Amino acid sequence: MQFILSVITVVFIGGIAGYLGSLMLTKRMALVAGPIGHLALPGVALALVYNFNIFFGALFSIGVGALIIWLFSLRSKIPMEALTAIVFASGVALGFLFLPLSHAEEALIGDVNQITMFDTVLTVFLSLTVFFVIKKIYNNLILSEISEELAANLNVDVKRYNLIYLVTIAVIAAMEVKIVGILLTAALVAIPAAISRNLSKNLNQYVYIAIFSGIISSIIGLFLSKITGIPTGPLIILTLFVFFLISLIFVKK
Amino acid sequence: MIKNKKDEKDKIILNVEDLNVILGNERIIENLSFKVKKGEFLTIIGPNGSGKTTLLRALFGILPYEGKVEWRKNVKISYLPQRLSKKDFSYVPISIKEFFKFKNVLDEDILNMLNSVGLENSNNLLDMNPDELSGGQFQRMLVAWSLIDNPDVLLFDEPTTGIDIGGEKTIYELLYKFWKDRNLTILLITHDLNIVFAYSTNCLCLHKEKKCYGPPKEILTPERLQEIYGTKIKFYKHTH
């Protein structure tokens, strides 16, 4: 039963991470999921200490972190990326103050064996919600990436769409913590999209290959973990890396 | 007499009054007022930094401004910015068909439109990525994209940047043809005085403020051109 829940959860998270990642890669934001994942650590630590759901701890702490970065940016002229570095690294440091060491591995690289029925239902619900939200704004965000001025021809409210897009990244990063931990969140969104970028010639293929790579690697990683006893998160990422190497052979112009 | 005045007013598609655009600490456009009638082919000229691009962006509503920019109700505007390059399309795997589909149009219409800008459907044109086109083909594809959802007004910012001289000519001929066939209103920024004289019904000379406005053959005297560009311009008027 535990295994079935794990399979369903990784399939949905892998798929949605691939989908969102395809957007993040074209917007040259693939790395953003990294710091955002790290921002989750204090919340994850609290969740582990007080025994509540990691997802909510992660989401809460990402929200607070993003708010702090934003407040800093109002006060200082330091570029956003530097402020992000300051806040996320401090978040990690803070998290380690009260992260129980026995749970360190779970927080850092995830643990699918802790997935409950509730987690699975929540994952499926949130993945589908994010999928449909992103699907609605996907084309417009792609066009605004090509040229914001061209996008203005379609009355695209880029600012509003970007906000929605950032919120979905935070939700996905918080969900990812459960299966790949805070250290590997960037890889789960970046690598499927990178594989797909190598193999696809148009937007349609790009989206499908990204989702498919995310799903298939998550399943393979999970099974390898079952066989070897090595944690699932790193195995999913290494599977993705192998697929990425293979995709390099078949790069489409 | 009153009726005439009303007719005149009905023809106005754009009314600009006391337009000021400030970017950073610099006033780029100063107290600019002019009117554009429906069906006009207006060229906008002026030296570099005279605010041509800024004006077009303000008219399109993507720059904050002071003053009045009043488009006729329900007018559909298509804006083609300056310096769009094939490189902008190279970060995203996208086919030409998908690029046009952003505008929710039918495959058949896409092909027809591409044909009418002189792009033949060879080598599976629709499946190609825009960055696989030549410079001239790419610009024509953009013109097609701008026209496919039947706009009333085109705002074009030097659509021939980066094209060789032969290609430039065809792009402008194309624009002129569409202008005549489709009863478009065109506002075109250009450096090419040949185009101004050959095609435009009116010309706006800009240097922060309006320097002159009217039919090119009347207003663009050699003295005026020297005043606008600050150097002596050798220009021989061709008769078309």
Image (cartoon, coloured by chain):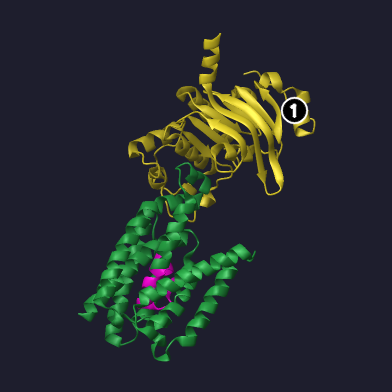
Q: Is residue A12 above or below residue B220?
A: below
Residue B160 visible in the shown view: no
Taking depth in this image into account, of B20 and A24 the one nearest to the observer is B20
Q: Could you tell me what secondary structure mostly forms the magenta stretch? A: helix
Residue A201 visible in the shown view: yes
At horizontal 53% and vertical 52% (from top left) the residue drawn is B87
Chain that appears yellow: B
Chain that appears green: A
At horizontal 68% and vertical 49% (from top left) the residue drawn is B24
Task: Please check the rendered image and state whether residue A182 is part of the magenta-colored stretch, yes or no.
Answer: yes
Answer left or right for B23 relative to A115.
Answer: right
Q: Residues within 10 Å of mark 1 (few under 14, many from 20)?
A: many
Instruction: Classify the position of the C terminus of chain B by image quarter.
Output: top right
- Outermost residue, front direction? A50
Going by the numbered disc 1, the residue's amino acid type is: Leu
Q: What is the count of numbered marks? A: 1
Give the residue number, with chain letter if any, for mark 1: B225
Question: Where's residue A89, x and y in %?
Answer: 54, 77
Question: Where's residue B86, x and y in %?
Answer: 52, 48
Instruction: Classify the position of the N terminus of chain B by image quarter.
Output: top right
Taking depth in this image into account, of B126 and B84 the one nearest to the observer is B84
Task: Please check the rendered image and state whether residue A195 is part of the magenta-colored stretch, yes or no.
Answer: no
Secondary element under disc 1, as helix, strand or loop, is: helix
Question: Where's residue B128, x and y in %?
Answer: 42, 48
- Outermost residue, left direction? A1
Answer left or right for A140 relative to B221.
Answer: left
At horizontal 65% and vertical 29% (from top left) the residue drawn is B33
Q: Chain of mark 1?
A: B
Answer left or right for B176 relative to A217.
Answer: right
Q: Is residue A33 above or below residue B172?
A: below
Q: Which residues are magenta?
A: A172-193
